[in-house]
Image (spheres, rainbow, N blue to C red):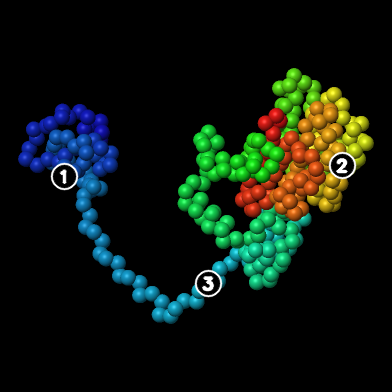
Amino acid sequence: MSSILAAFPTRLPIGRGSIRACWWKGCGGFCEEKRCLGWTSGIPSSWRRARRVENPWRRVPPPAPLTPFPGPTKTPRPIPARSRGDVLRLRGLRVPPPDDHLLPVYNRAPLAFERGEGAWLYTAEGEAYLDCLAGIAVTGLGHGHPKLVQALKDQGEKLWHISNIFRIPGQEVLAARLAEATFADLVFFTNSGTEAVECALKMARRFHWAAGQPERIDVIGFEGAFHGRSYAAVFAAGNPKYVEGYGPPLPGFVQLPFGDMAALEAAMGPTTAAVIGEPVQGEGGVRAWPEGDLSALRALCDERGVLLIYDEIQCGLGRTGRLFAHEWARDAAPDILCVAKALGGGFPVGACLATARA
């Protein structure tokens, strides 16, 4: 049919009756109305009997309104909500524990808390527990303190994050307060204590590099220490359970028995960059350096040109009765100090404090 229609000119002067020939495929080739796109001039009306095609674009009357469903005569019984565990039990399948999708790096107690007030924690069933862990030395000001809650609300209505390429007045105020309260001249803020340790290690090595002694990269630590879980931090502490399975050890880290001053003096050499230690070890068994040894450690580092780094992430910020644990010793201030945990009281923040020289 298309070949026959193609033989006709654009408009044919044929008889009285005619239909329209449409080249748009939607109507099948013919239509009696001008509603199709692309219709052209008429062809013999006698062809109407040969092929009668319905116009698919002809307006269709709207359907009759639907009769609304009368609905149930009784209030239906609500279907109880089912958790994924309920569905698995009904199917006879294994129900995974709630933390099944968490990487098993902690031996978690089968206990969950819903809220806290001060030094108390409460489960969903209303059981109260005295929080002697403080989130592993984090919630130094307790849970839900009204002033802290209000501070979070106020800040939440202002700014959530701003890059360090801009001035941050609150950051400047906190840095000034930390500097005024300690030996430090400069403060570098981090998101965690581990990052503060990383900053301290990098700062110590770069100090000697800038002084023309790039060979001084060794950092001396002590057995039983914990400085975080990043790559450099675990090797700075040297705990076997944290370094096994991660390939060759990072070079430049040495561990000595805790508090062994004779071994420390013997280990210091021309490649030693820094000594890192906790004035009070936490994970190592709550072991404290004697006050006299901290003073001797400071004097030894000055004599050998070695930087002294204190990790007070867990023992600092008032946990020993003073702002920092090393303050109990005379003339024992470090060159670099790592803090976190109670610094934010639950808000993720850490800091690396240092002298202008370091």
> Disc 3 on helix, strand or loop?
loop
Q: Which residue is mark 1?
A: 33
Kindly identify the amino acid type of the residue bearing the numbered disc 1: Glu
Residue 22 location in percent, x, y?
A: 21, 37
Q: Could you tell which of marks 3 and 1 lies nearer the N-terminus?
A: 1
The quarter of the displayed image where residue 46 is located: top left
Q: Quadrant of the C terminus?
A: top right
Q: Quadrant of the N terminus?
A: top left
Q: Residue shown at 78%/45% (left/top)? A: 326
Kindly identify the amino acid type of the residue bearing the numbered disc 2: Asp
Crowdedness of circle 1 by 10 Å Cα count: few (<14), some, many (20+)? some
Crowdedness of circle 2 by 10 Å Cα count: few (<14), some, many (20+)? some
Relative to 75, does residue 43 appear above or below in the rendering? above
Q: Point out which mark residue 293 bears.
A: 2
- Label 2, label 3: how many angstroms apart (C-alpha)? 70 Å
Q: Which residue is mark 3?
A: 79
Q: Residue shown at 75%/19% (left/top)? A: 212
Q: Tags 2 and 1 in contact by the CB under 8 Å rule?
A: no
Relative to 267, does residue 92 appear above or below in the rendering? below
Residue 292 location in percent, x, y?
A: 86, 43
Q: Residue furthest top?
A: 212
Kindly identify the amino acid type of the residue bearing the numbered disc 3: Ile
Asked if residue 22 can be seen in this view, the reply is no
The quarter of the displayed image where residue 94 is located: bottom right
The quarter of the displayed image where residue 276 is located: top right
Q: Residue shown at 53%/33% (left/top)? A: 165
Q: Residue shown at 26%/33% (left/top)? A: 2
Drawn side of residue 85 relative to residue 239, left or right: left
Residue 289 location in percent, x, y?
A: 85, 46
Q: Tags 3 and 1 in contact by the CB under 8 Å rule?
A: no
